[in-house]
Image (cartoon, rainbow, N blue to C red):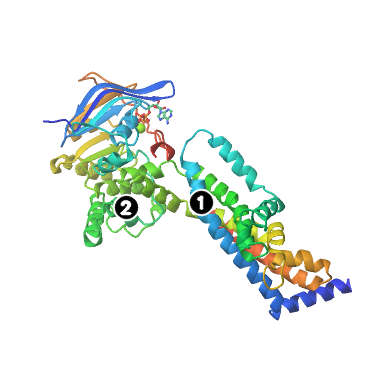
Amino acid sequence: MEFLAETFRTALALILSLDGEVVTAVVTSISVALWSILFATLAGVPAGVAVGITEFPGKRLVITILNTLMALPTVVVGLAVYGIISRQGPLGELGLLFTPKAMIFGQTILAIPIVANFTLSTVKGADPRIIPTALTLGAGPFQSILQLTRELRFGIMAAVIAGFGRVIAEVGVAMMLGGNIRGYTRTMTTAIAMETGKGEFALGLALGIILMAVALLVNLFLNILQQR
Amino acid sequence: MNALYRLIGIRQSHGERTVLAIDDLALFPGKLYTLTGANGSGKTTLLTLLALLAPPTAGELRYEGEPVQWTNAALLGLRRQVTLLHQSPYLFDGSVFANVAFGLKLRGIRGDEKQRRVEQALELVGLPGFGQRRARELSGGEAQRVAMARALALEPKVLLLDEPLANVDRGTSELLEGVIAALPERGTTVIMTTHDPEHPGRLGGEQIHLIAGELACPGFVPEINASTGFQTEGVSNRAYL
Ligand SMILES: Nc1ncnc2c1ncn2[C@@H]1O[C@H](COP(=O)(O)OP(=O)(O)OP(=O)(O)O)[C@@H](O)[C@H]1O
Ligand SMILES: [Mg+2]
């Protein structure tokens, strides 16, 4: 009991003193997640909207695949991207492995299906009059789709935040592609996973508390958006 | 006079069901038409076709003498001349002003001219000073009138009105009837659906009556079904792109 209380005090002290190691891990986590979600948004939102508003043969299949991809185990994505960017892989010459860029690569792939799927369901639930209304007021096809996304902005923001929530909390990709290099690719999750094992329990706990706070904020945001 | 619209052998089907079958119909510019018929008789379907929002299953639609090409490039120019006020209109999230200005901005109308046309349109429907209200916070009848203002602001060549007076109070109905009746003189062709048996006579113009998707013979006295739906039928985000 005394051990836990003591560790907790140390963890709090680490957070409050803005311990260098803690701050670096938090900053790395958040910046990698932000870059990933930026790319995932650029790919996932248009994909979700496109699937949502068009009819084409095989649409069902595409949706099923998107759903399956949403549940991709992070280690599988890690494995696949590792294969692509490791020295012998097709992108091996870029030397991406164990860099933040590699983590961004993997987490983008992880987030795209989530962003696309959530966007898709928002579009499917959209008022069916939006596009015809825009068209009859003189909008072209592209402008009316733009108007549709404007009307759905809260749902699309929720999709993006859900994707962010997934990547900030994942450990598989960050560990396998980043390598948990101190001060470089060490994130909150990899630090918790590895450092705890090495007896740095207070550091792990400090990061765990921050991660929880971030997750809480993300969910709070999601909730507010879904009320709109 | 040359016809504005000409419908030849038009069929509109949903699956197996044919819901509109018009062999020959000509509509002339600068006139006012009232479109009547029971629920489900095909009024909205016909207006959706005339608004160039959905191609017919079969047949030919001519606009100003030319067969309509159902390609995005050709449609954009035509749709800028024709506006449909939906039976239960959709207002975009945002201010009333932004809604009424929507089509004006698309036509490159900005600044003072935009301001003037928005204010004028809101005045016409009896909602002066409503510009800064949030569209989502309007009452049903107010929303209907804002949608009407949004269409009027465009000063379109053709105004298709799907039961524009169904949700509004008596005073407003009289106000809007006056506005609608005055449009043909300014060169706007109006085609308006209604369930009110007095409208065709009071508004003047010609009456088109549909029975189960077909034109009723001239002079036929329609039986009127007063109930109006709150529907979004015949319209879908997907179908138009
Ligand atoms: N998307 C659709 N799918 C299947 N059937 C449809 C669709 N849209 C309309 N219909 C059918 O077409 C018929 C004509 O509908 P329409 O909306 O044109 O009637 P209406 O004359 O406008 O009726 P109301 O007075 O109720 O507005 C109806 O029987 C309707 O059920
Ligand atoms: Mg109707």
Residue that carries the numbered disc 1 in the rendered image: A45
Chain under numbered label 2: B
In three-dimensional space, the C-alpha distance between marks 2 and 1, rounded to whole angstroms, equals 24 Å
Of residues A185 and B21, the one nearer the viewer is A185
Of residues B217 and B72, the one nearer the viewer is B72
Q: Which mark is residue B102?
A: 2
Residue at 53%, 45% (x, y): give it: A120
Residue B47 screen position, x and y as percent: 30, 33
Residue at 79%, 69% (x, y): give it: A195
Relative to B1, is A79 on the left or the right?
right
Q: Quadrant of the N terminus of chain B?
A: top left
Q: Quadrant of the C terminus of chain B?
A: top left
Residue B105 screen position, x and y as percent: 29, 55
Residue at 26%, 24% (x, y): give it: B209
Other residues around mark 1 within 10 Å, as few (<14) / some (14–19) / many (≥20)? many
Q: Quadrant of residue A26?
A: bottom right
Cβ–Cβ under 8 Å for marks 2 and 1: no
Label 1, secondary structure: give it. helix
Relative to A139, is A4 on the left or the right?
right
Relative to A79, is B171 on the left or the right?
left
Q: Residue furthest bottom?
A: A17
Label 2, secondary structure: give it. helix
What amino acid is at disc 1? Val
**B178 w.r.t. A74: above or below:** above
Relative to B54, is A168 on the left or the right?
right
